[in-house]
Each structure stands twice: as structure tokens, then as C-alpha cells.
């Protein structure tokens, strides 16, 4: 065979600069769960929150992280125009019960810059008292900027019905820019209200891939409201969700086409047990050349998928788990 | 050896999907099952794989009584089954499915070898999703690959030729002839293709739920040529 890739780097063997931070073992665990592993401080800026305080902050020559000065909690992240191949890590870790915080992070990405932003929140409680985190993120992408944004939400620890994470995300994409958001919330979060709004300029593209799993009595609502403002702008919303046990999810999307544009939203949901899903897609075309499509499919796991995996030797439960993992892009 | 005794399958709104089927197929033997649409071929294979439970009868594989075993247990007892209509999985890449079939992590080179065996230009397929993006023929070949890579006592292939283009079909015939030569497993292939029929040690015809013919190629082929689609349970020539 030609050009086979070499063995991937074993991240665990590479130095992780987060190891040197004065943080608790639980926080370290949360950081690992959020895929925060920083080998190279030259090309990586970070701001690590632990229980509402800053546990470590680092800027690079091109990416400046500056704490808010208006009394709010959070940071401004400035990515210089033309920056390439750099990353920003801004995880929020909560390893206590009783935390309630709104965190405002704004990302100003200069023209033509290419960056990866790894965000996310992990809450690990140790009593029934609730901890709540709301990350209010604004993205301002200048012309031609390209951003990959990865956000994971994790809940864990002991206690019942006490983890709430409410991400509020707003993005403004200038001409020719590109923003891809990969958001994952798989179990452990009892209550979540997710809101994503945005305006997409000429020739710009927004891609959102969302993977959600709720179980027990968890509730999640997801709202998208995206306006395709510029000529040849586009948005692709792909939401995959699994509702297990007695959990409930509500999905609402509104795509507004104000110009010649392409909008596609797909909401796919798998029901397991008594899980319930409500999906309300709305398309609004205000321009004769707006092309908007919505697809939604909700149902149980297909029987023949389980049978196929059983014929390969998996048990029914293993098959179901694999199908869900694949569906949620976590295989 | 696979032994089917008195296999019958009825469902509430349809009786006699399979009627008293008796067959013994040895290790290392290849049997091609053919016959008209709706004759019960897929039902027979699904009964052997455990996907449906016959209303009557017993199924033995060597010394193992499969009759009461579930699909997973039969798979682990050495049954591999390639579907007539392969299943699509949202979010599974080809590599994921191949790894599940292999029951271990394979490296890219190993996955490539498996895929090139079924005539897929391997590198470009590894990370494709086993979903709407693949054509029926591509999906079918991946399906066959997941079965071929398992080392089992009994291989079941349901119309492997369906949806496969002519070039790949030649390749497929080679695969079966190689499997027959190199494995001492029992192989059952449902097929209407002469080139696959020609590989068979014995041929079986299923029509209207009955095994109307079961014998060597020389015995059965003349019947197929004379009245291929007029078999019924009354047709002479059952074993
Ligand atoms: N679950 C089912 N419900 C109703 N009819 C069925 C079912 N399964 C099979 N059949 C019927 O049984 C007959 C045999 O089907 P099948 O085994 O698929 O035949 P073949 O593979 O030979 O074309 C057909 O008439 C089919 O419609
Ligand atoms: Mg059939």
C-alpha cells in the first residue's frame, strides 16, 4: 500500500504543560475529558478556569488573552490577522457543588487567521447542591478567517439533578470567513439550554455539528437562529441526538435567508426507552435565490442495524451502544 | 457439517414460508441455493443465522445445537451471514464496521487488504461513512468484506451478486472459488448467477417454501434450464 500514515503520536508521552499548573486532581481529570492537552506553548494560548478563578493563563505572540475589564467574568481573545496553525484552549472546570457562574468570552479573529479553539465545560459535583455554568461566547470573524471551535460538556460526580450548563453562542462571520463548531454533550448534564445565533456575511460559511445525549430525567433545549445575510453565504446545521430513559429534548432551528444563499439543517434523533424529542425547524426565505432545506428524522434504532452487528458477534446491548456511539460521532 | 431437520416457518398472516426443509451440508462443501423470488431462500438463511425462529425443526452445526441460540450466540459459534440488503449506519466509517467484524483494532494496511479483496480501491474508502453516500454496489462489497474476514465454520451469502457491476462480479466469483478451495467451512450462497452456480458442489432449489431439488450440478442443472420458474412443492426431484 502506498503512503500509509505513520503511527499516530501517543499524546500521553508528550509533555503537557497543564501538568505544571496548581490545580486539583478532579480538575485534571476534567481537563483530560475535555481533550485539553497542551504540548507546545509557543503555538497555544490558554486560559484555564477552575471553580470561577483563573488557574492559568498564557498568550502567544499572535494570540492575546485579556481578562474582561467591565466587571464581568471572562476573557477577550484577540487573534492577530494572518495567524496560522495556532490553538486557544479556554476550558471551564467546576469541581464543587454550589457554583453558579456566567462567563463572557469574546473571540476577535483577525483577517485571514486560521485557529482552532477548544472550549468546553466540565462540572463534577459532590452533593445535591446544583452547580451551573453559562458560557456566553461571541465570535467576531474578520474577512477570510477560518476557525474550528470544539466544545464539550461533561457532567459527573455524585448527587442528583445538579449539573446545569447553558451555552449561549453568537457569531458574526465577515466576508469569506468560515466557522465550524463541533459541540458535544453526552450524558451527565441534567439541564441545558443551548442557544446559538449568528449572522453570515457574503461568501462566508457556518458549519455546526452538534452531538447530544440525554438520559435519566435530563432535559436539553437547543435553539439555532441563523441569518444568511450576505450573497453566497451558507450554513449547515447537523444535529444528532439520542434521548434515553425519561429524558426530553427540544430542538428549534430558524434559518433566515436574506440573500442568495444556501441553508441546510438536519436534525436526527434516536429514541431509546421513553425518551422524547420535539423538533421544530423553521425556514424563512426573504430572497428569491435563497435555497433552504430542512431534514428531520426521529425514531428508534433500526432493527436491521442491531441484527447486522449481532451477526458480527456483538450482543444486543453492545450493538445498541456501538450504533449510538457511531451516530453521535464518538466511535 | 450443517444439518437442517424439518425446518418449517409460518407467521400469523402467512403460512408455509418454509415447509419441512431437510438438508445436510458437509464441511468444505459449497451449496448454491436458487429458485424463484419469494421461494423462501432469504427466510432459510435467516433461520440458520437466528434472525428468525422456525416454527418447527432443528438446526445443528457440527456438535452444536443452534436451534435455541440467539443471533449473537450463533455468530460466536461460527456462523457468518452476508445480507441481501446491506444495512446503512449513520456515523460509522468503513473502518469502524471492518474493525467490529474483526473484533480487534486493525491498522490501515490491514483494512486496505480486506477492502481490496472485494475490489474496492481501499485507501479512499476507509474513512467513508457507511451511509447514503455509498452506492448500493459499494455497500454490498463492504458487506461481503465484513463476512469474509471472519474465520468461521459456516458462511451464508444472500445474493452477493446483486448490485455488483460486471467487472467486480468476475472478482467476486474468484473470491468464492478461493474461499471454497482454501477453507474447510460450509458455504451456502443464494444466487441466480450461472458462474456462481458453476462453483457449487451441490445445488438446491427453493420454491414456494419447499426444497424442490437438492443434488449435484449435473442432476439439477437440466431441470433449471427446462422450466426455471415453474417449480412448485409438487415438482418431482426433491431429495
Ligand atoms: N416477515 C414477513 N412477513 C410477511 N411475509 C414474509 C415475511 N418474511 C417473508 N415473507 C414472505 O415469505 C416469502 C419468502 O420470502 P423470502 O424468503 O424473502 O424469499 P426469497 O429470498 O426466495 O425471494 C415471500 O413471499 C415473502 O413475501
Ligand atoms: Mg431473498
Image (spheres, rainbow, N blue to C red):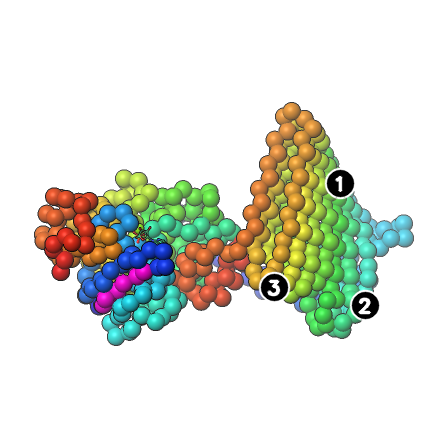
Specify the label residue A140 is tagged with.
Answer: 1
Which sits earlier in the primary sequence, circle 1 or circle 2?
Answer: 2
| Quarter placement of the C terminus of chain B | bottom left
- Identified at 69% across, 50% down, the residue is A222
Q: Secondary structure at mark 1?
A: strand
Q: Nearer the viewer, mark 1 or mark 2?
A: 2
Which sits earlier in the primary sequence, circle 2 or circle 3?
Answer: 2
- Identified at 11% across, 54% down, the residue is B236
What is the crowding at mark 3: few (fewer than 14 residues within 10 Å), some, or many (at least 20)? some
Magenta segment includes A217:
no
- Relative to the observer, which residue lies in front, A18 or B126? B126
- Relative to the observer, which residue lies in front, B86 or A233? B86
Q: Position of residue A13 (x, y in %)?
A: 58, 64
Chain containing the residue with disc 2: A
- The answer to whether residue A199 is above or below residue B216 is above
Which sits earlier in the primary sequence, circle 3 or circle 1?
Answer: 1
Q: Which residue is mark 2?
A: A98
What is the crowding at mark 2: few (fewer than 14 residues within 10 Å), some, or many (at least 20)? some
Which stretch appears magenta?
Answer: B4-10
The reply, left or right, for residue A184 in relation to residue A9 is: right
Residue B60, can we see it?
yes
- Identified at 42% across, 59% down, the residue is A307
Specify the label residue A245 is tagged with.
Answer: 3
- Identified at 65% across, 61% down, the residue is A247
Chain containing the residue with disc 3: A
Amino acid at each position: 500500500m502506498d503512503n500509509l500514515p505513520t503511527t499516530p503520536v501517543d499524546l500521553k508521552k508528550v509533555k503537557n504543560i497543564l501538568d505544571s499548573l496548581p490545580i486539583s486532581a478532579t480538575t485534571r481529570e476534567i481537563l483530560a475529558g475535555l481533550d485539553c492537552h497542551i504540548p507546545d506553548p509557543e503555538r497555544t494560548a490558554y486560559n484555564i478556569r477552575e471553580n470561577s478563578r483563573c488557574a492559568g493563563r498564557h498568550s502567544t505572540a499572535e494570540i492575546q488573552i485579556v481578562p474582561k475589564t467591565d466587571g464581568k467574568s471572562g476573557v477577550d481573545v484577540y487573534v492577530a490577522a494572518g495567524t496560522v496553525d495556532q490553538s486557544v484552549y479556554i476550558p471551564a472546570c467546576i469541581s464543587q457543588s454550589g457554583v453558579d457562574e456566567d462567563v463572557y468570552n469574546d473571540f476577535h479573529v483577525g483577517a485571514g487567521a486560521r485557529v482552532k479553539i477548544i472550549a468546553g465545560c466540565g462540572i463534577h459535583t459532590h452533593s445535591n447542591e446544583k452547580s451551573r455554568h453559562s458560557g456566553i461566547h461571541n465570535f467576531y470573524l474578520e474577512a477570510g478567517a477560518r476557525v474550528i471551535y470544539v466544545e464539550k460538556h461533561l457532567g459527573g460526580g455524585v448527587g442528583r439533578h445538579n449539573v446545569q450548563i447553558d451555552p449561549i453562542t453568537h457569531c458574526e462571520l465577515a466576508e469569506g470567513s468560515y466557522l465550524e463548531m463541533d459541540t458535544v454533550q453526552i450524558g451527565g448534564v441534567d439541564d441545558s439550554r443551548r442557544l446559538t445565533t449568528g449572522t453570515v456575511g457574503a461568501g462566508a460559511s457556518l458549519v455546526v455539528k452538534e452531538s447530544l445525549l440525554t438520559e435519566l430525567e435530563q432535559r436539553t433545549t437547543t435553539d439555532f437562529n441563523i441569518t444568511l445575510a450576505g450573497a453566497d453565504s451558507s450554513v449547515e446545521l447537523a444535529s444528532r441526538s439520542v434521548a434515553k430513559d425519561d429524558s426530553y429534548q427540544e430542538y428549534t432551528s430558524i434559518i433566515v435567508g436574506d440573500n442568495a444563499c444556501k441553508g441546510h439543517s438536519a436534525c436526527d434523533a434516536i429514541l431509546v426507552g421513553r425518551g422524547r424529542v420535539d423538533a421544530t425547524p423553521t425556514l424563512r426565505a426573504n430572497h428569491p435565490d435563497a435555497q433552504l432545506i430542512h431534514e428531520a428524522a426521529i425514531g428508534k434504532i433500526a432493527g436491521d442495524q442491531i441484527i447486522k452487528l449481532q451477526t458480527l458477534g456483538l450482543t444486543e446491548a453492545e450493538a445498541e451502544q456501538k450504533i449510538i456511539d457511531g451516530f453521535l460521532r464518538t466511535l | 457439517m450443517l444439518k437442517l431437520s424439518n425446518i418449517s416457518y409460518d407467521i400469523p398472516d402467512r403460512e408455509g414460508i418454509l415447509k419441512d426443509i431437510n438438508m445436510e451440508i458437509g464441511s468444505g462443501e459449497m451449496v448454491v441455493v436458487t429458485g424463484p423470488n419469494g421461494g423462501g431462500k432469504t427466510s432459510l438463511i435467516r433461520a440458520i443465522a437466528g434472525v428468525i425462529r422456525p416454527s418447527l425443526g432443528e438446526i445443528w452445526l457440527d456438535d452444536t445445537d443452534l436451534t435455541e441460540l440467539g443471533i449473537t450466540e450463533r455468530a460466536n459459534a461460527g456462523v457468518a451471514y452476508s445480507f441481501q440488503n446491506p444495512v446503512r449506519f449513520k456515523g460509522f466509517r468503513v473502518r469502524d464496521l471492518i474493525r467490529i467484524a474483526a473484533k480487534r483494532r486493525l491498522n490501515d494496511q490491514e483494512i486496505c487488504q480486506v477492502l481490496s479483496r472485494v475490489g474496492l480501491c481501499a485507501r479512499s474508502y476507509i474513512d467513508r461513512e457507511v451511509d447514503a453516500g455509498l452506492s448500493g454496489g459499494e455497500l454490498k462489497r463492504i458487506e461481503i468484506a465484513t463476512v469474509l474476514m471472519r474465520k468461521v465454520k459456516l458462511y451464508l451469502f444472500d445474493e452477493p451478486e446483486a448490485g455488483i457491476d460486471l467487472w467486480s462480479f468476475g472478482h467476486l466469483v474468484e473470491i468464492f472459488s478461493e474461499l471454497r478451495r482454501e477453507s474447510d467451512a460450509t458455504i451456502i450462497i443464494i444466487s441466480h448467477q450461472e458462474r456462481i452456480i458453476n462453483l457449487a458442489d451441490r445445488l438446491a432449489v427453493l420454491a414456494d417454501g419447499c426444497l424442490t431439488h437438492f443434488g449435484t450440478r449435473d442432476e439439477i442443472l437440466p431441470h433449471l434450464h427446462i422450466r426455471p420458474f415453474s417449480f412448485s412443492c409438487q415438482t418431482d426431484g426433491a431429495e
